Image: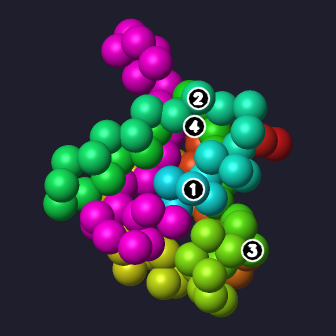
Amino acid sequence: MPDDTRQNSVGPVLRAGEMADAVVEAIQEDNPDKVFVIEDRVAYIRIETEGECVIRQETLSNALGRPITMPEVEVNLTSFAGRIETTDTEMRFYLKREL
C-alpha cells in the first residue's frame, strides 16, 4: 500500500507474540478482499489496510487452536488506526460509521 493511501489505514497494533501471530492469520482470512501491510517491529506488530477490517472470534480461536474471548485480544492491543467497535464475537476497525 503506497504511503499516500496510508492516511485511510485502519487496523490493530499488538504486542508481539502468539496472539499477534494469530491475529495476522485470522484478519487475513476474515478479510480476503483486503491487502494488508504488516510491520513486525520486534516488540509489536502493526497490521493495516484501507478503510475497514474485522477480526472474528471464531477465526481467531481456530488460528490459536483454542477458544478465545475478545477481551483477551484487547489486553494485547497496544494501539490501533481508525475507529474501533467491539462485540463478544468481533472486533471491527473502520473510518466511517455506517448509518
Residue 98 vertical placement versus 15 (above, below): above
**Marked residue nearer the N-terminal end (2 or 4):** 2
Decide if residue 50 is in sight here. yes
**Marked residue nearer the N-terminal end (2 or 1):** 1
Q: Element type at marker 2?
A: loop
Q: Which residues are magenta?
A: 1-22
Residue drawn at point x = 72 percent, y = 52 percent: 30
The crowd level at tag 4 (other Cα within 10 Å; few <14, some 14-19, many 20+) is: some
Residue placed under numbered mark 2 in the picture: 35
**Marked residue nearer the N-terminal end (3 or 4):** 3
**Marked residue nearer the N-terminal end (4 or 1):** 1
Magenta span includes 99: no
In space, the residues marked 4 and 1 are separated at their CA atoms by 22 Å
- Say the numbered circle drawn on residue 95: 4
Mark 2 in CB contact with mark 4 (< 8 angstroms): no
- Say the numbered circle drawn on residue 79: none
Q: Element type at marker 3?
A: helix
- The kind of residue tagged 1 is Glu
Quadrant of the rendering where the C terminus is positioned: top right
Mark 2 in CB contact with mark 1 (< 8 angstroms): no
Which corner quadrant of the image does residue 26 belong to?
bottom right
Residue placed under numbered mark 3 in the picture: 58
In space, the residues marked 1 and 3 are separated at their CA atoms by 12 Å
Residue placed under numbered mark 1 in the picture: 25
Q: Position of residue 62 (x, y in %)?
A: 69, 74
- The kind of residue tagged 3 is Glu
Residue furthest front as drawn: 65
